[in-house]
Image (spheres, helix red, strand yellow):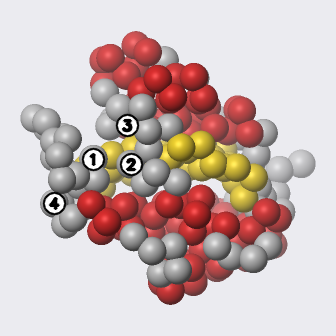
Amino acid sequence: MRVDDGELIAQAQALLDLFRKSKLKIAAAESCTGGLLAATLTAVPGASDVFDRGYVTYSNESKQAMLGVPAATLERCGAVSRETAEAMARGALDRAGVDAAISITGIAGPDGAMPGKPVGLVHFAVAVHGGRLLHEERRFGNIGRAEVRRASVLTALTMLRDLAESCSPRS
């Protein structure tokens, strides 16, 4: 996966411009993308006006320690679940003090599938102040590890763009 992917960079630039106009700051909590969203955003000059920080929480232990994801959530629902994605987004929002936080957790493959959780399953969540929480589940299929990660970053950028278009600056 290359961070100089023209489509990803163009989407990131458009997103950063939109958030900059709205005076919104964002953070990311990533698992299966391993920091690719943060790398894509920071490939754009001036990203620090909008992007505050990223958390790469690949293990369950890091999700707990860095984002406060409850152990009970991980045990009951697993790392790849709506509940974990939402807890990751809320944790990033609380810890970073930004306007919005996005999380990504999934199975990029080629291994890791389990009953009901195939390769290509990815959960996304966006948390904003005031308790608003958005969730999206995608089943990209077994399209290859790099393509699942790339598709996940594109989905995250789209979710954030949609959010910025519907939000006004926090007072």
* Label 1 vs 2, first from the N-terminus: 2
* Label 4 vs 2, first from the N-terminus: 2
Q: Residues within 10 Å of mark 4 (few under 14, many from 20)?
A: some
Amino acid type, label 3: Arg
Amino acid type, label 1: Ile
User: Of the numbered discs in the image, which one, if any, rests on residue 32?
Assistant: 2
Amino acid type, label 2: Cys
- The image position of residue 152, as x and y in percent, is 39, 61
Which residue is at a point 39% across and 70% down the rendered structure image? 1
Query: Is 56 located above or below residue 166 in the figure?
Result: above
* Tags 1 and 2 touching, CB below 8 Å: yes
Which of the pair 82/114 is nearer the observer? 114
Whole-number angstrom distance, CA of label 1 to CA of label 2: 6 Å
Which of the pair 30/77 is nearer the observer? 30
Whole-number angstrom distance, CA of label 1 to CA of label 3: 13 Å
Which residue is at a point 28% across and 53% down the rendered structure image? 108
Query: Is 145 located above or below residue 135 in the figure?
Result: below
- The image position of residue 39, as x and y in percent, is 58, 63
* Label 1 vs 3, first from the N-terminus: 3
Amino acid type, label 4: Asn
Marks 1, 3: nearer the viewer: 1
- The image position of residue 51, as x and y in percent, is 72, 59
Query: Is 67 located above or below residue 11 in the figure?
Result: above
User: Of the numbered discs in the image, which one, if any, rests on residue 82?
Assistant: 3
Q: Where, by quadrant of the figure, is residue 162 drawn?
A: bottom right
User: Of the numbered discs in the image, which one, if any, rests on residue 107?
Assistant: 1
Whole-number angstrom distance, CA of label 4 to CA of label 1: 10 Å
Check disc 4 and report the residue beneath it.
142
